[in-house]
């Protein structure tokens, strides 16, 4: 069950040109206070789930984002009672105003067991343009 959570998130985030993400599915994966942490730059950018959804929606409406396809390459799960962490290596194919870009990176999911379900409390990530730079154990 835990091992499949990243694939569910990637399914929710991914969409084809003229399509849209499944924001309801995405939100259902998180606790109410869940957060996204983009750590690709000099300082982390932290957004609530609604703020993340608004950011993606705005980027789609303005044409900055045309399509997203994120897939999992591998993952590992650590579970400690009612908390867990998933490390998920991914490939992201992003189409935007500047064309198509492919990135590789890692998402770290922190999860809690709540109401008979595993839900994400936070999702943080970093990515690289070049897959050869990806090294989870470095």
Image (cartoon, grey):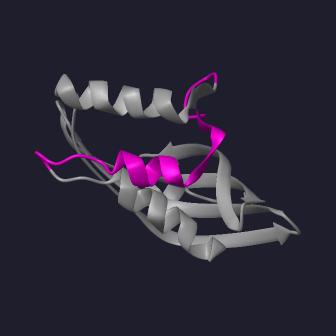
Q: Residue at x 62, y 77 (%)?
A: 1
Going by the image, does 76 lie left or right of 66? right
Total label count?
A: 0
Front residue of this view, candidates 102 and 53: 53
Query: Going by the picture, which residue comes out furthest to the left?
Result: 18
Q: Residue at x 65, y 57 (%)?
A: 119
Q: Residue at x 29, y 24 (%)?
A: 58
- Can you give x and y, in whole percent of width and height, for residue 44 in the image? 63, 27
- Can you give x and y, in whole percent of width and height, for residue 132 in the image? 49, 59
Going by the image, does 94 lie left or right of 49? left
Q: Residue at x 72, y 61 (%)?
A: 115
Going by the image, does 76 lie left or right of 16? right
In this picture, which residue range is highlighted in magenta? 17-43
Q: Is residue 67 above or below residue 76?
A: above
Is 32 colored magenta in this rendering? yes
Front residue of this view, candidates 30 and 47: 30
Is 105 colored magenta in this rendering? no
Is residue 74 something that shows in the picture? yes
- Can you give x and y, in whole percent of width and height, for residue 46 in the image? 61, 27
Q: Is residue 108 above or below residue 8?
A: above
Query: Going by the picture, which residue comes out furthest to the right?
Result: 81
Is residue 103 something that shows in the picture? no
Q: Is residue 137 above or below residue 68?
A: below
Instruction: Name the image quarter holding the C terminus.
Output: bottom right
Front residue of this view, candidates 136 and 120: 120
């Amino acid at each position: 069950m835990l091992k499949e959570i990243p694939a569910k998130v990637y399914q929710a985030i991914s969409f084809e040109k003229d399509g849209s993400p499944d924001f309801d599915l995405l939100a259902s994966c998180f606790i109410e206070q869940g957060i996204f942490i983009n750590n690709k730059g000099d300082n982390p950018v932290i957004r609530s789930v609604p703020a993340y959804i608004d950011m993606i929606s705005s980027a789609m409406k303005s044409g900055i984002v045309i399509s997203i396809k994120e897939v999992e390459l591998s993952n590992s799960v650590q579970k400690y009672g009612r908390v867990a962490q998933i490390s998920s290596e991914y490939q992201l194919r992003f189409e935007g105003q500047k064309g198509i870009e492919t990135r590789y990176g890692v998402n770290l999911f922190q999860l809690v067991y709540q109401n008979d379900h595993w839900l994400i409390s936070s999702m943080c990530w970093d990515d690289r343009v070049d897959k050869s730079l990806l090294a989870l154990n470095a």
